[in-house]
Image: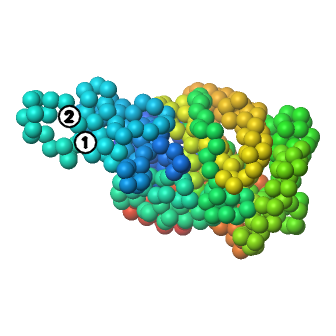
């Protein structure tokens, strides 16, 4: 699909069709587009790196990075690549070290990224190598939001707060304690990682607010291990509530429920007296800390481009890394619990999370099968000519006093389409100014 930049911009306007609310299948299977994404999406946007409680090797798009603290306790994010010949200077998933030493030629780096050790510095380099010019490459901007660490390689990118905008409302719901304690969550039981044969955008779209696909998870409800803990019940049964989908600026999306009554919600915890009492306590404390905002119960969302999450139980973060080609993704998942929760509650939620989601969970297996077969069925010559339909909720978006963004109640696909609209703006633009110009020209959100 070799084409000029002008031709690409024209094609993107056809491929993400605002009038028909249709998206071409090419953006999920084309290798040239995948490579351009690494430059215009993942080298440009704010990406989730990890949690402040961790020191470990992470990913930003296809780039391996190190998240660590220096001796003064300041967090840094570095490209995990020696400046001499590119070898990874850290090959462990997590841990602690006083210095990073490349196993290839022995260059060593301090925890602040500076080059501190060069073998044969006097004999071979004649003490002439300017060490201060060859430290590890650090990200251009970094942010710590309630313990979550974010970074971008682009120094011209908007600030983290500006880029996230209204999405911070829902990130609070993810990162705060269930009782509304600011930043009251912690990572529990490490990071799960697995590879799925599908494009990263398919999973991002699913978490962006696909409330339409529960037919895929019917077996989970029938055997009674869904969030409600009862056969045939849905995770939207939170007393009386109405489901919504929200589309925000910069392609951020959310699906949740607006609670209409005053009924404590204790999903998957009914069989434990300790856990049920804790959940009920959190419910009323949340109302004190959040006020009217406590009625807004986030379910799942996607902070553009690839930070997907569940706010309810199980409370998880899913980062959908591009996996090296258009048809492969590498998923990383963090499990969050309240730091001040009883140990019995933490264990119950961890066991529930393992059987419900993640690579061995029943619902995640359903989803991976959907994405796998959809990807393979979209690559053929004839199949690639048929666009995907995103017309559900079209012309039915509205504002709501309690909910950020543009809202479609019950079910809708305008949040997913809005994600692709912003994707197209980034892919067609040479810089952030052009991104904003394109968005203004089409009148903001779809």
Q: Quadrant of residue 159?
A: bottom left
Q: Quadrant of the C terminus?
A: bottom right
Question: Which SS class for mark 1?
Answer: strand
Whether pointer 2 and pointer 1 mark residues with C-beta atoms closer than 8 Å, the reply is yes
Q: Quadrant of the N terminus?
A: top left
Indicate whether 18 appears above or below 30: below
Q: Quadrant of residue 67?
A: top left
Q: Residue at x 44, y 39 (%)?
A: 96
User: How many labels sit on residues?
Assistant: 2
Residue 180 seen in the current view: yes
Q: Which residue is mark 2?
A: 118
Q: Quadrant of residue 134?
A: top left
Q: Which residue is mark 1?
A: 115
Q: Is residue 36 left or right of residue 363?
A: left
Q: Is residue 129 left or right of residue 381?
A: left
Residue 241: x and y in percent read: 84, 61
Task: Report the front residue among 118 and 389.
Answer: 118
Residue 415 seen in the current view: no
Residue 232: x and y in percent read: 91, 42
Q: Residue at x 80, y 37 (%)?
A: 217
Task: Report the front residue among 129 and 137.
Answer: 129
Residue 270: x and y in percent read: 89, 47
Residue 413: x and y in percent read: 69, 52
């Amino acid at each position: 699909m070799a084409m000029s930049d002008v031709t690409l911009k024209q094609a993107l306007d056809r491929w993400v069709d605002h009038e028909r609310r249709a998206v071409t299948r090419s953006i999920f299977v084309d290798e040239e587009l995948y490579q351009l994404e690494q430059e215009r999406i993942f080298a440009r946007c704010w990406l989730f790196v990890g949690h402040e409680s961790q020191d470990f090797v992470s990913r930003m798009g296809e780039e391996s990075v190190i998240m660590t603290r220096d001796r003064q306790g300041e967090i840094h994010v570095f490209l995990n690549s020696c400046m001499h010949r590119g070898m990874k200077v850290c090959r462990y998933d997590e841990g602690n070290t006083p210095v990073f030493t490349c196993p290839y030629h022995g260059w060593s780096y301090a925890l602040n990224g500076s080059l501190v050790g060069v073998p044969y510095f006097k004999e071979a380099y004649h003490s002439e190598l300017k060490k201060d010019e060859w430290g590890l490459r650090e990200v251009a901007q970094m942010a710590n939001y309630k313990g979550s660490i974010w970074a971008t390689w682009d120094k011209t990118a908007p600030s983290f707060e500006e880029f996230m905008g209204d999405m911070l409302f829902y990130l609070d719901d993810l990162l705060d304690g269930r009782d509304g304690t600011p930043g009251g969550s912690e990572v529990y039981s490490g990071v799960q990682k697995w590879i799925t044969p599908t494009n990263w955008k398919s999973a991002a779209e699913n978490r962006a607010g696909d409330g339409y696909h529960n037919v895929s998870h019917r077996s989970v409800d029938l055997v009674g291990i869904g969030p409600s803990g009862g056969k045939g019940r849905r995770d939207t049964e939170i007393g009386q509530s109405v489901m919504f989908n929200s589309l925000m600026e910069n392609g951020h999306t959310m699906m949740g429920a607006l609670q209409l009554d005053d009924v404590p919600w204790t999903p998957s915890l009914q069989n434990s007296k300790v856990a049920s009492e804790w959940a009920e306590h959190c419910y009323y404390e949340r109302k004190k800390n959040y006020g009217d905002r406590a009625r807004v119960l986030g379910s799942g969302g996607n902070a553009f481009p690839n930070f997907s999450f569940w706010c309810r139980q199980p409370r998880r973060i899913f980062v959908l890394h591009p996996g090296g080609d258009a048809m492969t993704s590498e998923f990383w998942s963090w499990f969050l619990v309240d730091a001040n929760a009883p140990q019995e509650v933490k264990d119950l939620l961890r066991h529930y999370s393992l059987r419900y989601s993640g690579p061995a969970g029943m619902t995640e297996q359903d989803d991976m099968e959907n994405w796998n077969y959809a990807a393979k069925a979209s690559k053929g010559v004839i199949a690639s000519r048929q666009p995907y339909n995103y017309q559900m909720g079209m012309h039915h978006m509205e504002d709501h006093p309690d909910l950020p963004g543009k809202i479609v109640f019950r079910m809708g696909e305008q949040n997913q389409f809005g994600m692709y609209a912003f994707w197209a703006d980034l892919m067609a633009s040479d810089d952030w100014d052009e991104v904003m110009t394109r968005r203004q020209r089409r009148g903001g959100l779809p």
